[in-house]
Amino acid sequence: MFYGMFYDPTYVLVIIAAVIALAASGYCTSVMNRYSRMRISSGVTGRQAAEMVLHSAGIHDVTIWKMTGMGSSFYRYDKTIHLSSELFEQPSITAVATAAHECGHAMQHAGGYVVNRVMNTIRPVVQISSNAAIPIFILGLIFSLEPLQKIGILLFCGVVLIQLLSLPCEFNASRRAVAMLGQTGILRTEEEMRGARKVLFAAGLTYVAALAGSLLQLLRLIIISGGRDRD
């Protein structure tokens, strides 16, 4: 297989990964924007929804912070939930669904969710290996050292593993969120519940796209390594 300076047939995998990522991101943005304009009948904001879900789950030691910017949210293992000012203050389907999702991660943490424990155990090692994977692989190509290429590929597998493990975490947090939104009365109609499911499903697709991109990149490394070996 020929790999010239300006010709690499594996670039098609890069293009496919980019298309998947853009499609998932675009769909997620579209859905979240749509449901951010739909005010819920209970009038509960993102912050209030987070408080209600946490207290209903028996969690009282998690702090909710408002961030600057729009659209972002995350849960940290110092027991804090961070919501953008938009999500923090809005009484919309997107706001409460997103806030409840982050509470789902807090519930996982409090309950010792096994996948989270595994991820937290291996994450420090994987972060180091993922940073080193591509440089080691490139050095293996430059100096035609097959062992270095294989090491780079094995290290990159850590990236795939973390993203693979993130899927059950994210979808489990979303299932918890939907259940709690109904139980607490934050969402009161089937239309609102359906909207929340769509928001959380769209957000989950971005993690699926990230995994697909990493798998395609891993395949690309394997193909490049195999092509150089035959050369």
Image (cartoon, grey):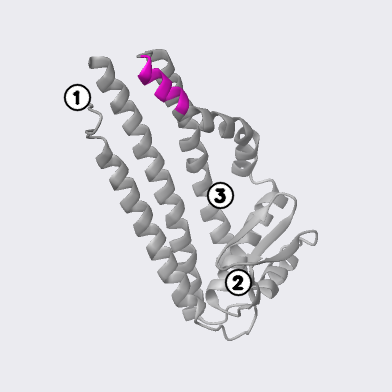
Q: Nearer the viewer, residue 33 or 62?
A: 33
Which is nearer the N-term, disc 3 or disc 2?
A: 2
The residue identified by callout 2 is 87
Q: Nearer the viewer, residue 133 or 163?
A: 133
The residue identified by callout 3 is 169
Q: Is residue 153 left or right of residue 97?
A: left
Instruction: Locate the N terminus by quadrant.
Output: top left
Determine if residue 134 is in view. Answer: yes
Q: What residue range appears in magenta?
A: 135-143
Q: Amino acid at mark 3?
A: Cys
Q: Secondary structure at mark 2?
A: helix
Q: What's the magenta bit mostly, secondary-structure-wise?
A: helix
Q: Amino acid at mark 1?
A: Phe
Around disc 2, counting alpha carbons within 10 Å, would you say few (fewer than 14), some (14 to 19), or many (20 or more)? Answer: many
Which is nearer the N-term, disc 2 or disc 1?
A: 1
Does 73 appear above or below 132?
Answer: below
Instruction: Locate the C terminus by quadrant.
Output: top left
- Mark 2–mark 1 Cα distance, whole angstroms, equals 51 Å
Q: Secondary structure at mark 3?
A: helix
The residue identified by callout 1 is 2
Q: Which residue lies at the image location 40% right of the left edge and 18% below the top edge?
A: 140
- Mark 3–mark 2 Cα distance, whole angstroms, equals 21 Å
Tell us which disc is closer to us: 2 or 1: 1
Q: Secondary structure at mark 1?
A: loop
Q: Which residue lies at the image location 42% right of the left edge and 56% below the top edge?
A: 205
Question: How far across and down, in percent of the image, does residue 84 sit?
Answer: 62, 67
Q: Residue furthest front?
A: 5
Tell us which disc is closer to us: 3 or 2: 2
Question: How far across and down, in percent of the image, does residue 121 sit?
Answer: 65, 34
How many badges with numbers are in the image?
3
Q: Nearer the viewer, residue 177 or 228?
A: 228
